[in-house]
Amino acid sequence: MNAKTKLSVNINKFATLRNSRGGNNPDVVKAAIDAQRFGADGVTVHPRPDERHIRYNDVREIKKIINTEFNIEGNCTEQKFVDLILEAKPHQVTLVPDALDQVTSDHGWNTIEHKNYLIDIIKVFKNAGIRVSIFVDPVIEMIEGSAQTGTDRIELYTEGYAKQFLIDKEKAITPYIAAAQKAKELGLGLNAGHDLDLHNLKFFKQNIPWLDEVSIGHALICDALYLGFENAVQMYKRQLV
Ligand code: PXP
């Protein structure tokens, strides 16, 4: 039997929509409550220093109502982000090497070059009882480097998979299987995210059944516009069985 892979729903896009008008519609706290009610195993947010979608205060409000797994992603080189994590104490923090002006995450950590930095910052979060995951490309050396940092998990950056899947899905999954096997061998938990959708998710899970968690935002929220949020969450969950 397959191990359970958790679906963490990234609700940043609710905040993007809200911020485009001012006011509080849609309400991101309600979105988190509903994601959980509709079957999500967790909620993910990605506050950025300019607060262009999720605001730091949203994180505090969501923390009050979360009864599943709370995952906060972000750039830990910002002290503001570190302070927020230590205050909100989510179940998991996912460290992403974003530049300040990036539209979305587009690369993983260089775990060799930034090894000492990662060791220190990971210790800060783990000492506070927070599980740590670091965002990495599916490159064996980077997975080996991750194992030296003390991180609990890695999150494989799946944009490359999603793009190549449209051309040749076997070729698309190959480096991810190798990276996932290496992670397992080194005792690292395994998450994945970025551009996963209703077309490519099932194949990813079938090939890497020991996957612990996926975090999905953009495609799921786009699908929700047509299918409704509850249906979209349920359809994504069905890809993971
Ligand atoms: N994982 C990380 C680290 C991300 O930065 C994002 C995007 O915020 C995601 C997963 C989710 O990607 P998508 O919105 O394409 O599903």
Image: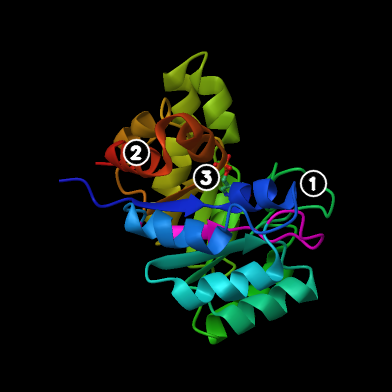
Q: Earlier in the sequence, mark 3 or mark 1?
A: 1
Q: Which residue is label 3 attached to?
A: 193
- On screen, residue 238 above or below 98: above
Q: CA distance from mark 3 to mark 1?
A: 17 Å
Picture residue at 70% right of the left edge, 76% below the top? 82
| Quadrant where the image shows the C terminus | top left
Q: Which mark is residue 181?
A: none
**Which one is in front, 25 or 47?**
25
Q: Residues within 10 Å of mark 2 (few under 14, many from 20)?
A: some
Q: Earlier in the sequence, mark 3 or mark 2?
A: 3
Q: Which residue is label 1 attached to?
A: 102
Quick one: SS at disc 3?
Answer: strand
Q: CA distance from mark 3 to mark 2?
A: 20 Å
Say what amino acid the circle numbered 1 marks. Answer: Gln
Q: CA distance from mark 2 to mark 1?
A: 31 Å
Segment tinted magenta in the rendering: 41-53
Q: Which residue is label 2 attached to?
A: 231
Picture residue at 30% right of the left edge, 41% below the top? 240
Q: Residues within 10 Å of mark 1 (few under 14, many from 20)?
A: few
Residue 93 placement (x, y as % from top left): 56, 67
Say what amino acid the circle numbered 3 marks. Answer: Gly
Q: Earlier in the sequence, mark 2 or mark 1?
A: 1
Give the mark toward the camera: 2 or 1.
2
- On screen, residue 109 above or below 82: above
Say what amino acid the circle numbered 2 marks. Answer: Asn
Residue 88 magenta: no
Picture residue at 36% right of the left edge, 49% below the top? 211
Quick one: SS at disc 2?
Answer: helix
Asked if one can make out residue 188 in the rendered structure from this viewpoint, the answer is no
Mark 3 sits near ligand 1, with its Cβ under 8 Å away: yes
**Which one is in front, 128 or 239?**
239
